[in-house]
Image (cartoon, grey):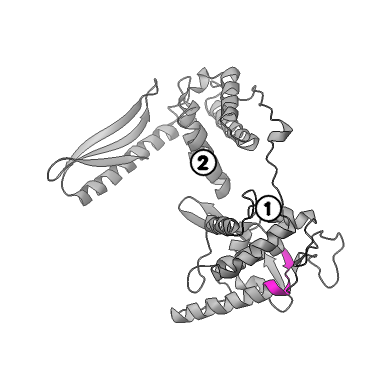
Amino acid sequence: MAGSLRLVREPDVYELRVYVGRDSSGRVKHRYERLTGNKRAAQRALAGLVAEVDHAKENRVEAGRLWGSATMLDAAFAAWKLNGWQDLSPSTTRRHESIWKCHVESSIGLRRISELSAYDLERYFRKLKSEGLSESTVRQVRVVLNRTCRLAGRWSGGVIANPVRETEFPSWSIDADRVVRAPDAGEAAALLRACANKDPREAAFIRVVTATGVRRGEACALRWSDVDFENRTVTIDESIVAVCGGAIVKGPRTRASIRRLSIDSGTAEVLAGLRETQRELAEMCETELEDESFVFSFEPGGATPPYPDVMSHAFASLRDRAKVASDVHLHSFRHFQASGRARARRTDPRVERPRRACPERPWGCGVAFRSG
């Protein structure tokens, strides 16, 4: 809920303004109040006013007074957030929220569902396509709209029809598809060389992702207890998921998500060096580095995992320094591991997981980096 304050008369009269929504014609509506006092008191009053308006909006949704021919898309989406998002993963709700705010909220979200036709929605989808959105993004917009309208129809007792159901999706040419490209051996080697002068945590993080092809969230969740230096393996059994206001540690969806991957001697040495650096930092700060500490944490003692987006930004900076193409991302190394195309002096990928596990490597064979 958006709010603002401004000084309207010296020295201590403030005007508070809170956004409450839009009327039936789409005009913005605000609630105004005036307060006499200092700026801190005005800020506290503004926070209370925002909470009051937000609570009133939730009560209107929960009371079911919005279901009918006047129900707008934005209101139905807000109702879904209150009743249904608890069953979704944090990453899914974060993506839905982003899709709605960027592409729906201030445009078609202001329309009444009952006034929308399949024709209107198909024009809207093609408008998004003409603005340069990818097929996957437009498809996600359609999925969120369809779910919103379907729930509105059910909660209204069938009064509201779902106009998304009858729409046809725009087509994209094959050339327009944005295929995720796996980096080649030269690009992988350039990235590893560029790690030399990076922060040791970021350098080790990129090395591990390159060597194993794990997801960035899985690498962020790696703990020292997951690293077996003797057998040169890492165990993947958790993931860091970004949520509003921070990140959480999430367990695997299935048993197949829990896996043990081999690492080469060079990567093991990099991790061992990072562990010593982290231990020294913990001692300087009069704390301890424990087995359950996060490997790539930026906090002394490693109690807090790194935020996935921070590591993606660090990789983007490294990629620019290494003069590697911008279509290479951290996730590209999952394709790099699966492709089997990268064969160079510094890399020896063995990425095909055998159907029958090797006796000496029951978890399968991963990429190995030879030093020298």
Q: Nearer the viewer, residue 104 or 255?
A: 104
Q: Nearer the viewer, residue 40 or 155?
A: 40
Look at the numbered disc 2 and give the secondary structure of its residue.
helix
Q: Which mark is residue 267?
A: none
**Where does label 2 land, which residue?**
98
Please say whether residue 255 is visible from this viewpoint.
no
- Please indicate whether residue 93 sits to the left or right of residue 234 in the image: left
Q: Nearer the viewer, residue 195 or 252?
A: 195
Q: Amino acid at mark 2?
A: Ser
Q: CA distance from mark 1 to mark 2?
A: 23 Å
263 falls in the magenta region: yes
Tally of numbered discs: 2
**Where does label 1 land, which residue?**
332
Q: Amino acid at mark 1?
A: Ser
Up/down of 168 relative to 321, above or below: above
State the residue at coordinates (57%, 72%).
Answer: 292
User: Which span is picked out in magenta?
Assistant: 259-267
Up/down of 104 relative to 183, above or below: above
Look at the numbered disc 1 and give the secondary structure of its residue.
helix
State which tag comes first along the sequence, 1 or 2.
Answer: 2
- Residue 76, percent from left and from top: 49, 31
Q: Tell me the quadrant of the picture where the C terminus can be found.
A: bottom right
- Residue 148, percent from left and from top: 55, 31
State the residue at coordinates (50%, 66%).
Answer: 304
- Residue 320, percent from left and from top: 58, 55
121 falls in the magenta region: no
Q: Nearer the viewer, residue 203 or 5?
A: 203
